[in-house]
Amino acid sequence: MIRLSDEQEAAIRAHAVRDYPYECCGALLGRVENGVKVIAEVRPIENTHEDGHERRFQISADQMFALMVEERNGGWTTLGFYHSHPDHPARPSQYDRDHAFEGYSYVIVSSRKDGTGNLTSWEVVENVPSFRAERIEPWEGPRQQQYEAVMAALTDEDRDRCLAI
Ligand SMILES: [Zn+2]
């Protein structure tokens, strides 16, 4: 479970619109409290993927190293990452699955030219080639409805990659 404030969600959405039609990405920093990833800072990161970052996001080794150094020096812990899916649903792609690491949360927001759509979060499931949908607190209301919309639209292929909450 991950906790995201309205302001943090708004920052992710604004970044997604700003970088459209390309994928934006960023880090989710904070602390784990009682098993909940409590986000303290949403930090935009440059998407360094070389061939067409419309469909891919990549965070460089240098950027990852900088986050680790910051954490070691008493900063926030990197709890996950966010990225946008321009003109695509807020569900993980095969590329996302192939490049995901256990323990991190992966927030995905669907973006369009004129705004954003559903916003969801995903975690890697151990030993299974799947993501599990992760609840974003506060859960009731729009966030729950966004998951239901994404889950209802899953194809058979998506279903192998995305597990319900
Ligand atoms: Zn993706």
Image (cartoon, helix red, strand yellow):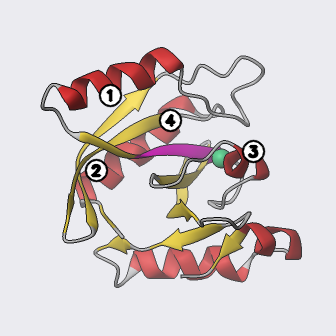
Inter-mark Cα distance, 1 to 3 = 24 Å
Who is closer to the viewer here, 73 or 95?
73
Q: CA distance from mark 2 to mark 3?
A: 25 Å
**Residue at left 62%, top 60%?**
90
Q: Amino acid at mark 2?
A: Gln
Residue found at the very far right of the displayed protein:
156
Q: Residues within 10 Å of mark 1 (few under 14, many from 20)?
A: some
Of tags 1 and 3, the one toward the viewer is 1
Residue ID for mark 2: 8
Q: Are marks 1 and 2 in contact (CB under 8 Å)?
A: no
Q: Is residue 9 above or below residue 25?
A: below
Q: Nearer the viewer, mark 1 or mark 4?
A: 1
Q: Position of residue 10 (x, y in %)?
A: 33, 51
Give the mark toward the camera: 3 or 4: 3
Region in magenta: 80-85
- CA–CA distance in space, label 4 to label 2: 14 Å
Callout 1 secondary element: helix
Q: Earlier in the sequence, mark 1 or mark 3?
A: 1
Q: Is residue 128 left or right of residue 34?
A: right
Q: Earlier in the sequence, mark 1 or mark 2?
A: 2
Query: Who's the residue at 45% across and 52% down the image?
Result: 104
Residue 98 in magenta?
Answer: no
Q: Residue furthest left?
A: 74
Q: Quadrant of residue 43?
A: top left
Labelled pair 4, 2 in contact (Cβ < 8 Å): no
Is the CB–ligand 1 distance for label 3 below 8 Å?
A: yes
